[in-house]
Amino acid sequence: MRKLIIFTGKRKKTWRLVQVTLTSLFALSETAGAQQVVAPPPSVSLTPPAVLESAPDEMQVFSPENPISSFPDEVQPLQLGPVTLRPHMFYQFLYGNGIQSIPGQKQDTIVQAFAPGILLVLSPHWTLDYTPIFTFYSDKNFKNNVGQSVALTGGASYENWTFGLSQSFTYSSSPQVQTGTQTGQQNYLTALTASCQLNTKMSVDLGLNQTLIFPDGFQSSREWLTLDWLNYQFWPRLTAGVGAGIGYVDSSPDMVFEQFQGRFGWRATDKISFQVSGGAQFSQFTDGGGDPLVNPIFGASIQYQPFDQTKLSVGANRVVSPSYYQNQINEITSVNADLNQRLLGEFYLDVSAGYNWNNYIAAASRASANDAADYYSVNVQLSTTFLKRGTVALFYNYSDNSTAQSGLGFTSSQFGFNIGYRY
């Protein structure tokens, strides 16, 4: 679900840049592939500094947090001409049990991850980040590996139009819920966006996304989607829109699909906001594929901040996506909730929980689909900051995957700590 943003006054163009950039990043995050069993290092926020110069989004209760939000006001000693260098590092120590090395074989292991990286601020509107991730397992059934992450993000404006671009590449090799084994995967994600304020009430958002996923030993997929919206502002804190899109998936079998959706965003009070989208996806298969499908899709989120130190969010969504397995697609429905509480002025307690229903659907004639899976997890983290730009946290995670599919069911408990620093 993309964000609905209202623009008023002299900062309209800057707000358009916020919408384009955040929309691109949100679209990429929704296509990030399978669920990892082991908690991965957090990604670096790449919102360009100029985007953060604007006032907070009127439709969002929670103010956006970004490690480079204070960039325009700081002295930058690591600067080469027009390029500013902002190094960052992250280390995580984790002990977990019930982690599958191959389907049906569960191991107890220590996992250590070290991720030194560099964020290049190319201009007020463009950033480039590179982060290698070194992962080491104590159990020899898992393979140590070096992951890679590269991301370019930026935007530009021309008259009433604002354009955005997000391009990323990631390589990772970690235990996956859907495969039941350590799975190497390459992801190439691209998002192009354009937005225009037509008048004081109406605006359009145009988007083109490319998602290329190449898992080792499983089915690859290449997906292209354009999804376009016409928005209407009823009053400053209530908007609605209608959207239509068409896409193509190069997989087995190939798939052509259309989407029709509606959405609205409502900032009911200063403390609570609602955003909802929903509609249907119509899918047709080629190359001996099965019968056409109609699948409901939706997304929803609620943000509630009863006190300055307390943040509560609830979300739900349903998507249709390519599967790791041939002649199948996934219909994934998920719900999640998160509570963030500031304690004693220095500590942050974060408690989150999520539940996913993963339904496999046969996409080819005479093909059989995997059994459905129910996956839920609970995460608890206590963190604090040091030296202004450093963070340290203790965490605990419990997850359970319930399925009749042989070798893919598991329960896992994980705990550990992480420490990070962004210059």
Image: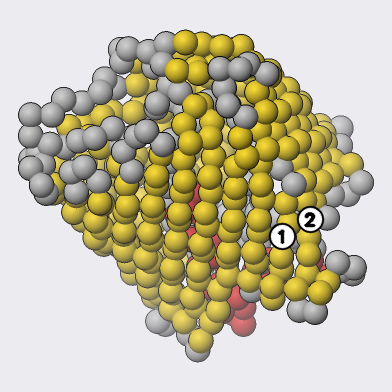
Which label was assigned to residue 176?
none
What residue appears at the point 56 percent right and 17 percent down from the top-left corner? 141
Q: Which residue is mark 1?
A: 119
**Helix, strand or loop for disc 2:** strand
- Amino acid at circle 1: Leu
What residue appears at the point 73 percent right and 31 percent down from the top-left corner? 92
Q: Is residue 154 left or right of residue 103?
A: right
Farthest-out residue, bottom: 159
In front of the other: 217 or 93: 217
Q: Which residue is mark 2?
A: 87
Residue 89 placed where, x, y %?
A: 77, 46
**Helix, strand or loop for disc 1:** strand
Residue 343 in view of the camera: yes
Whether 340 is drawn above or below 403: the answer is: below
Whether 85 is drawn above or below 113: the answer is: below
Q: CA distance from mark 2 to mark 1?
A: 6 Å
What residue appears at the point 38 percent right and 21 percent down from the top-left corner? 374
Residue 185 placed where, x, y %?
A: 46, 40
In front of the other: 298 or 423: 423
**Which sits earlier in the primary sequence, circle 2 or circle 1?**
2
Whether 201 is drawn above or below 222: the answer is: below
Crowdedness near tag 1: few (<14), some (14–19) or many (≥20) residues, C-alpha within 10 Å: many
Crowdedness near tag 2: few (<14), some (14–19) or many (≥20) residues, C-alpha within 10 Å: some
Q: Are marks 2 and 1 in contact (CB under 8 Å)?
A: yes
What residue appears at the point 70 percent right and 33 percent down from the top-left corner? 113
